[in-house]
Image: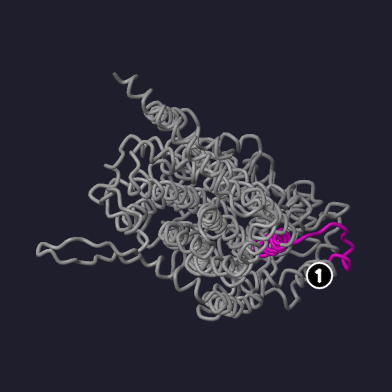
Amino acid sequence: MKTFFSALGRFSVRWRYAILAAWIIATIAITALLPGISSAVQQNDQKFLPANSPSVVAANLAQPLQPANVTRLIIVAYRNNSPLTNADMRAISGIEEAARSVKSTLLVRQTSISRNGRADEIMVASSIQKLNEYPLRSYVGKLSTAIHSVAAPPGLNVHLAGPVASQVANLNRNKGTSGRMQDFAALFIIILLILIFRAPLAPLLALLPAFLVVQISGPLIAEVAKTGVPVSVITQFMLIVIILGAGTDYGLFLVFRVRENLKNGEEPKKAVALAVSRVGESITFSAATVIVALASLSLAAFGMYQSLGIPIAIGVLVMLLAGLTLQPALLAIFGRAAFWPSKTQPVTADTIHSTEVTKAGQNGSTQRTVHKPGVWGRVASRLIQHPVETLATGIVLFAVLAAFSTGNKPAGFISGTSAPSGTGAAMGNTALAANFPKAAANPTDIIARFDIPVWNNATSLARFETILSHSHLFTSVIGPLDPNGTQLSAGELTKLHAALGSPQRLFLSHTTIPPVFTHSEIQAYMATASLVSTGGHTIALESSLAAGNPSSTTAMQATPAIRSEVAAAARSAGIRQYGVAGEAAAAYDVSSTAGNDLIHILPLVVLVIGLLLIILLRSLISPLYLIASVVLSYLAALGLSVIIFMFIQGNQGLVFFLPFMLFLFILALGEDYNILVMTRIREEAAHLPLRQAVTKAIERTGTTVTSAGLVLAGTFVVFAVIGGSSSDGSQIVEMGLGLAMGILMDTFLVRTLLVPSTVVLLGKWNWWPSRHGEEHWDNVDDNTEAIQLSQDMKEEEVGSH
């Protein structure tokens, strides 16, 4: 392994300019020729559910209600405090004509006027598909422009409304969020690293590979998504966070070791090659733990977790290649200049290890200059003196925090359903809720399929609708017999169908309406077009929940009771196929599926990462307590999240994916720091007593680990702050801050205090069954490596001449 990374280090140094050129050309070509990742993003989390989920079954049952290749949009024209006037109705006619003029519009027809006379609902049928993001955004934008180009009387408000308008509003709001997140994360990392290195160039060199990988990975993931790999909004955001955070961490592993080598007197190019030979293995296994953890998500039942697996694993793999080739190439090109104006001149080992050095004074007397160890050197010295107390205190603290994790209750989360506040779609939805049945804006749909058309079985339909209307679980239930506030009897529905045919025929064609029925009856019958399928076998009831807004946790938790109530009503009405669809039902299924994945996937992740640690450390003992430390750190971080978001903020529960994401990233990313610390302890233990090896390893890696942890935690904070402005804001804030707190606890307490304490207490058993003391072989490797580096440097010098 060491021979391979030694050769890779020499290769990256020798061909540094060619490697830099290759990465730049690849970045330009890939970004120019392949589509961006946003083109592959799926907006609705319900699409990520298994096909047998009850909400998905209900949605499939409702397919006959939506004509093939037709997308319906709603235009609502309204006055706030007075009925519509004749001038308003003339303007609304002009608005309908303007909507008809937009390309891809199939039909525009007035659906109904509200009972208070203040609002008019207009339905627009379009051939644009809801799943095609860019055509849909373009069409809705043109439609909005067209209807607002009509001069409206003062006080008449016109907005698009409904699910499709909300979806597009969310797409528009999220547009540019990932770019802002990338920019602010990069700015944060640069400022932090300038403070750490006290040099302007080193932070840029550490960040540049990660920045290029973000540009490359997005198009590559979009291309892979064409094969069916799912990509979510969270994927897009997390890719930036993981690549900039973890990628910069890998860069710091190398940069700090190069600086250390320079201070030890190595020539710059040799310092880079030696650094790759020493930390290349740590970087590779660190990336491997993340890749393996992410790849295991492909086994998850919940598609959003699947969307994080393969896509982000691709990004981390590209980051690993850049970290082992581009990063050392950049450091070899700039040499000591990378750390200017900081000093990287050789420092004697005596001053590094706090040994007194005497100098002759000007008057012939002797002065004693003592170099004080850094913060982590002093921490390490105290640590090895009191390992039992340190470990016991840490375990008690983390156990107390972990106890609070039992109070977690999952909260709902479905993206893209409610329109962002302040948008036209949000105002349109508010107008719908105020002037039409309350279920119109965001209903919970109850779907039923009859064996014979409801036109010939209206009595059974009436019984089904009546039972549910009287249920305490609903505040209102709107169905084919009460579609727009106008009551229709079972007999009237049958007569209307016999005379006019299906309501879709009236809506999707310019059929002349015979003056047999009243205007209100015609309007009510036309309003059933979205509630009864063309053949009459499938119906939908739009309900408002007594538990509250369908996006709330209480509504999600009421789903089992709602499904039981619907089942009882269906049995009473003789209906064999039925289901509940909508945001609350989907959120419940998402939460249940995600919870099952947490139980089944994470043990597999722990096992695979444990095997990687066994291979890397060549030990059966140390991987056990390293994994145990991660589990304890996870439970403590989850408990802290419960304290902050539930006990302090008053949330009803943690967003459903936070426990899963917290474990995944603390396990995978926390092991990065474990690997760096443990490999350095093993390296130093080859020629030092264990306690001294731990002291030196913590002194040398403490700054690296804490710097990397601050970078990663900081990028999660940026994720929370910038992502909080997206359509999924509150959940993203919760996840970002939760992960940041977990990473900080893991960095400053577990990796640098608890794990080293355990190493000191276990002594030689850390490496069992490997034999302790590999000094001879390390020295042989170092001598061989030094000879080969010298030869490479001479060959390069001759070649340059």
Find residue 768 and report its horizontal and vertical position in percent: 68, 57
Q: Residue furthest front?
A: 364
314 versus 597 height, above or below? above
Q: Which residue is mark 1?
A: 564
Q: Nearer the viewer, residue 202 or 634?
A: 202
104 versus 375 height, above or below? above
289 versus 636 height, above or below? above
Applied colour scheme: one colour
Around disc 1, counting alpha carbons within 10 Å, would you say few (fewer than 14), some (14 to 19), or many (20 or more)?
few
The answer to whether residue 162 is visible is: no
What SS does tag 1 mark?
Answer: helix
User: Residue at the spot x=57%, y=75% of the render?
Assistant: 391
Find residue 28 and report its horizontal and vertical position in percent: 41, 30
Q: Nearer the viewer, residue 709 or 379?
A: 379
Principal secondary structure, stretch drawn in magenta: helix
Q: Nearer the viewer, residue 753 or 555?
A: 753
Find residue 511 and report its horizontal and vertical position in percent: 65, 42
State which region is magenta. 570-598
User: Residue at the spot x=43%, y=51% of the render?
Assistant: 177
Q: Residue furthest left?
A: 363
From the viewer's perspective, is 592 left or right of 98?
right
